[in-house]
Image (tube, rainbow, N blue to C red):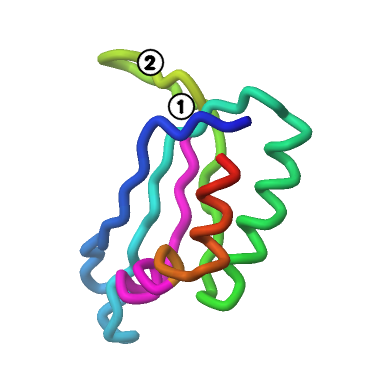
Amino acid sequence: MILLAGFALGAGAIQGLHAQAGKTPAYAIAEVEVTDPPLYQAYLAKAIDSLKPYNARIIVRAKPDVKEGTPAQGNIVITRFDSLADAEKWYSTAHYKDLIAER
């Protein structure tokens, strides 16, 4: 259904913008190659629902415009979380673990 070529969680240090909130945002970055579009749409709906309790949102879901190096095989998906702790909690949930099995 879906080939996940890579996945990473990380915190970004954006000084000033988030200094008032006391939190550093975190991002989940994945390269996704869709092999079955209807199944992917069903998976995506469930994945988006799994993000809601963590106030996360997908900020990029597109084919990258690669200037150097090997082009990506699929789309890049970047999801923003308010903190790395929120991203790790989401990734560790049973709901998301069930979604991993669907890929």
Residue 77: in magenta span = yes
Residues drawn in magenta: 76-89
At horizontal 56% and vertical 40% (from top left) the residue drawn is 103
Res. 94 in view: yes
- Three-letter code for the amino acid on which mark 1 is drawn: Pro
Residue drawn at x 40%, y 30% is 5
Local secondary structure at mark 1: loop
Residue 64: which disc? 1
Nearest the eye: 63 or 43:
43
Q: Position of residue 37 (x, y in %)?
A: 72, 29
Indicate the position of residue 75 as horizontal and vertical percent values: 52, 30
Q: Residue furthest right?
A: 38
Asked if residue 49 lies left or right of residue 57, the reply is right
The residue type indicated by label 2 comes to Pro
Residue 90: quadrant of the picture: bottom left
Task: For label 2, count other residues whose C-alpha is less than 10 Å away and answer few (under 14), some (14-19) or many (20+).
Answer: few
Residue 51 percent across, percent down from the top left: 56, 66
**Mark 1: few/some/many CA within 10 Å (<14, 14-19, 20+):** some
**Residue plotted at (51% across, 75% down):** 54
Whether 20 is among the magenta residues is: no
Q: Are marks 1 and 2 in contact (CB under 8 Å)?
A: yes
Can you identify the residue that label 2 sits on? Answer: 71
User: Which residue is painted at 25% across and 64% down in the image?
Assistant: 14
SS at circle 2: loop
Q: CA distance from mark 1 to mark 2?
A: 8 Å
How many numbered marks does the figure carry?
2
Q: Nearer the viewer, residue 36 or 29?
A: 36
Residue 38, image quadrant: top right
**Is 38 positioned to the left or the right of 26 in the image?**
right
Residue 87, above or below 98? below
